[in-house]
Image (cartoon, rainbow, N blue to C red):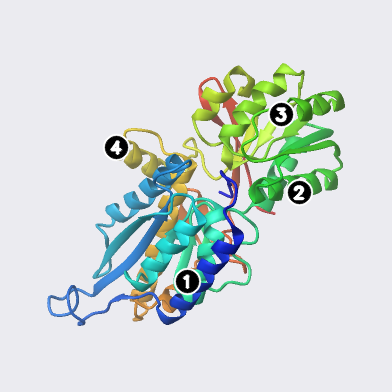
Amino acid sequence: MGIVTARFRSHAALAALLAAALLLAACGGGGGTPAGSGEGGGGDGSGGTIKVGLLMPLTGQISQFGKQTSNGAKLAFEQKGYQVGNYKIELVEEDDKNDETEAVQRVQKLITQDQVVAVIGSVSSRISIPISEVLEQAGVVHLTPTSTADNLTPGKKFVFRACFYDSFQGRVMAKFAREHLKANTAAILYDLKNPYSEGLYKSFEAAFKELGGQVVAVESYQTDDQDFHAQLTKIANAKPDVLFIPDYYDPVGLIAQQARQVGVQATMLGADGWDDTQLYELGGEAIIGNYFSNHYSTEQENPESKAFVEAYRQKYGEDPSALAALGYDAANLLMDAIQRVIDSGGDPTDAGQIRDALENTQGFKGVTGTIAFDENHNPVKPAVVLETTKDGHKYVTTVEPE
């Protein structure tokens, strides 16, 4: 998920910390305990220990997202008994607090002190982009479950994601608007300080126009704004068929309320940032009858999804979110790659060999779809479109990658 939930801290301070982390990372590197090298390896027939980092925002503004993603990942490891082949998986969890500086410090610890072979995380692109630079320099596998910013993975050997990227989501909703809703005109309201929101806006706008639609209004706001009446009044006057709001549930709920207050009649559209039950608490009646793209629906019929939903409900007492499903898929993608390294007679404590296996993933049957990676380490898989109803999110359709 490419969400940005607070204003950026000093770029100079972050740049200095990042440079220091890269220097330390170049001297460090991922790893584990290979067979026969001390505690956990060798003499008792065990293969050794593979250390994996789990970096999530467990406290702070989007801690709910972090906990959901972490829960999904930990369920996957638990189902495997924290074991791949004859190797023990040691999970090292850290809280990045959705703060860039904190995240770089935590990932630096994971590399140099814990000597992890891979890191699963984080939730937002705002965090995953800087930590990806550190992990790439260190040669440690980085697999984010949910960070969707287009520029996260290209040009990086060790960086992968389990989710689709923003440009794909924007195209999905433009196609849905034109083909399913028969919309001829669209307006867009986005957060100009949020790369996630801006990236989605641009891809939706381009695709909607390519499909023959007309964008009649584009308005913006800044993170933490609370009053959107001026922008929404202009949008109401333009009378669009659909209004695309590419942000996450907190501002979207407030925007939906104000949109109806000023007379916006358009069907509202969004992306994966809408995926939280609080959307209904914040948006009330105004949010009902709208649509958003997502990675997953509990209503999907594939056997992997059904088994996951049942296991997650039993473990946590609630339905899994798309974030939980992506965390689960990310953990299983990593373990699948490790297993293939073992099966080939390789060294699964070598991050480079895990990277190669991950890159060569084909036909992996995950909860969120059957996965292979493209040249930029983005998964090639479908998206779903969900409707916001009085009974919660309801599955509408699946949109395959083009």
What SS does tag 1 mark?
A: helix
What SS does tag 2 mark?
A: helix
Residue drawn 55% across the image and 62% down it = 13
Name the amino acid, label 2: Lys
Q: Residue 354: name its quadrant.
A: bottom left
Determine whether, in the image, residue 116 is placed left or right of residue 299: left
Task: Kindly check if marks 2 and 4 are in contact, taking CB atoms under 8 A apart as contact.
Answer: no
Compare marks 3 and 4 and give the one earlier in the sequence.
Answer: 3
Where's residue 150, x and y in %? 65, 58
Read off the residue under disc 1: 21
Q: Is residue 401 above or below residue 60?
A: below
Where's residue 307, x and y in %? 37, 43
Of residue 7 and residue 278, the one placed in the foreground of this image is 7
Gap between marks 2 and 3, in whole Å?
A: 20 Å
Compare marks 2 and 3 and give the one earlier in the sequence.
Answer: 2
Read off the residue under disc 3: 228
Closest to the camera, between mark 2 and mark 3, is 3
Read off the residue under disc 4: 314
Point out the image quarter for the C terminus: bottom right
Gap between marks 1 and 4, in whole Å?
A: 40 Å
Determine whether, in the image, residue 279 is placed left or right of residue 192: left
Where's residue 325, x and y in %? 44, 46
Name the amino acid, label 3: Phe
Callout 2 crowding tier (Cα within 10 Å): few <14, some 14–19, many ≥20: some
